[in-house]
Image: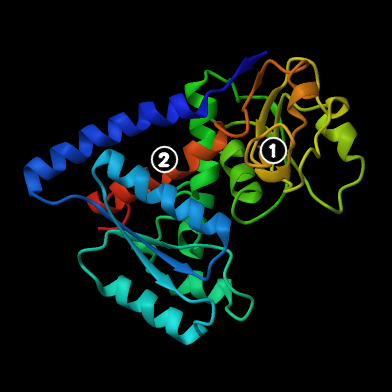
Amino acid sequence: MELIDGKKIAEEIRAEIRTEVARLIDEEDKAPHLAAILVGDDPASKTYVAGKEKACKSVGITSSVYKMPASTSETELLEMIDFLNRDPEVDGFIVQLPLPAHISEERVIQRIDPAKDVDGFHPLNLGRMLAGLPAYLPATPHGIMQLLERSGVETEGMHCVVLGRSKIVGTPLAILLSRKAKPGNSTVTICHSKSRNIEEIAAGADILIAAVGQAGFVHAGMVKNGAVVIDVGIHRVPSDDAGSGHKLVGDVRFDEVSKKCSLITPVPGGVGPMTITALLQNTLMAHKREIYR
């Protein structure tokens, strides 16, 4: 078993971004600008946005955060989105999910200018991805595809099983894996809460992607010998061994699964660093107007 080191691969890509941003600043006297809207006080969302700010700083991208209380109305949030859509200084922005229950995620996502939708969630960007056209790809699937490519994982002709069908990870990742591209050209099966015989299906995968949102869902009996395992999950669970009283685990039971697979991503340090890195890549593309001119 070998670890797929997401931190190392993310830093390799960030070094490439850093070089390109420095070149742009020399030529234009202006850095790419990524903004984020944070509604409420969700701890995981605050941690992600803080990580985004740190990552932006590390590569020379300007970062700004617009914090709004949980009581913000949907109308107020849409007005903030309109403001950022119009702001010529902002190349791309994200609305951090999840949102408070009284706000429609669909209406919010559809209000974002597709040219500034660096999260890749707008229907126009998803449609362009489905059609095989240049698009801002959703950050986590985009990051996973780069993990596979840069780790030398062969996807062509392989059976990839994706556990989870969310619009953010599972469904777009399945599309990317099946596209006529490199990496891609896989035979893809999506499993979800209504799927039967999930364990048997998973055990037939050459590449198993766990994105179900349940800690320790994937056990050794679900993994074929020599399979590649990508763990998208991240969960905070109590632990007496950690000074903080908790530890981070994934959707995969790492200790037992790692004994059977050929390659596996750890949690933390696997997919997580690649998600923010892919967001930085999309921001750079937005600044250069590579998708929408």
Task: Point out residue 44 in the picture as x, y percentages from the top left corner.
Answer: 57, 55
Task: Point out residue 81 in the picture as x, y percentages from the top left corner.
Answer: 38, 74
Q: Residue furthest right?
A: 197
Q: Is residue 181 visible?
A: no
Query: How many angstroms separate mark 1 from mark 2 (CA)?
Result: 20 Å
- Which residue type carries mark 1? Gly
Image quarter in which the C terminus is found: bottom left
168 with respect to 1 (left or right): left
- Which quadrant of the structure image shows residue 190? top right
Q: Secondary structure at mark 1?
A: loop
| Residue at the image point whose x is 83% and y is 52% from the top | 193
Task: Point out residue 156 in the picture as x, y percentages from the top left corner.
Answer: 60, 24
Q: Is residue 4 above or below residue 90?
A: above
| Residue at the image point whose x is 28% and y is 45% from the top | 57
Q: Is residue 193 above or below residue 65?
A: above
| Residue at the image point whose x is 77% and y is 46% from the top | 214
